[in-house]
Amino acid sequence: MIVRDYNEAKNTERKVSAEGWDSVRLLLKGDNMGFSFHITTIHAGAELHLHYKNHFESVYCISGTGSIEDCTTGEKHEIRPGVMYALNLNDKHILRGETEMVMACCFNPPVTGKEVHREDGSYALVD
Amino acid sequence: MIVRDYNEAKNTERKVSAEGWDSVRLLLKGDNMGFSFHITTIHAGAELHLHYKNHFESVYCISGTGSIEDCTTGEKHEIRPGVMYALNLNDKHILRGETEMVMACCFNPPVTGKEVHREDGSYALVD
């Protein structure tokens, strides 16, 4: 059994930061769960252009408000606590934080912890 | 892109209930994400004996307090907001709700939505 505390992990190298967001990776590929699990904070006012070409991701809003725009269909969806979106088509999207949003995120395949967002908004696959 | 709202889904057949807990399945096997994602509420005072022999599960505490006991090692871990546990060894465990606890849960392989807890605390695999 693995037990980890977000409030401790956020002060370690499990936390990665970039412009507009930070993410604390509570489970990574090396944990052999078959998915990774992250608590990600989107900063108020952030606009993130993302496209996980190589990963499926689900995102559940714990707190805060914002929106997600599907770049393929043009549809916008409001995000508030309780809303989940899942990028089952590796959907290219724009995530906007109205207030700071705290999100519970699952990735398949699991993130190794060494990825950074590339210019095209994706994560590379890492072995 | 799939978008679902816990506050709507909890009033549909996505919600399953049993003694001491209920669970709203926001992603199931049929969504083809490779994992399932559930918001599970453990009732105050509940004591659940669980053993997912066929699934890996991670559980992140959004709200509430309680504990998890590892039946193999006898160790007890406090659960409070921000604590995550992952049953990477299909660990047999006892989950206790001190107050009502709301948990974000990921299962691999994904749950189909038709499972019920069996007497031994596990979920059967369903095809």
Image (cartoon, coloured by chain):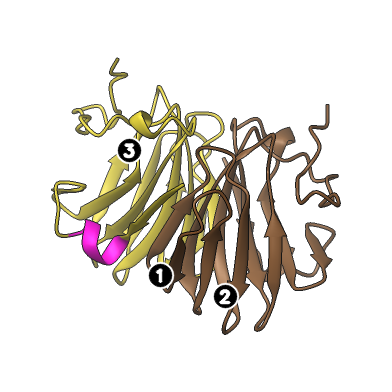
Chain colours: A brown, B yellow
Same chain letter for marks 3 and 1: yes
Q: CA distance from mark 1 to mark 2?
A: 23 Å
Counting from the top left corner in percent of width and height, residue A49 is at 71, 60
Dot 3 or dot 1, earlier in sequence? 3
In the image, taking residue B95 as reference, residue A38 lies left or right, namely: right
Q: Chain of mark 2?
A: A
Counting from the top left corner in percent of width and height, residue A4 is at 63, 55
Tell whether label 2 touches label 1 (CB within 8 Å): no
Residue that badge 1 annotates: B65
Residue that badge 2 annotates: A101
Closest to the observer: A5 or B6?
A: B6
Residue B50 disc label: 3
In the image, taking residue B114 as reference, residue B103 lies left or right, namely: right
Residue at image point 70% right, 65% down = A48
Dominant SS of magenta comes to: helix
In the image, taking residue A34 as reference, residue A17 lies left or right, namely: right
Q: CA distance from mark 3 to mark 1?
A: 18 Å
Above or below residue B117? Residue B1 is below
Q: Chain of mark 3?
A: B
Part of the protein shown in magenta: B6-10
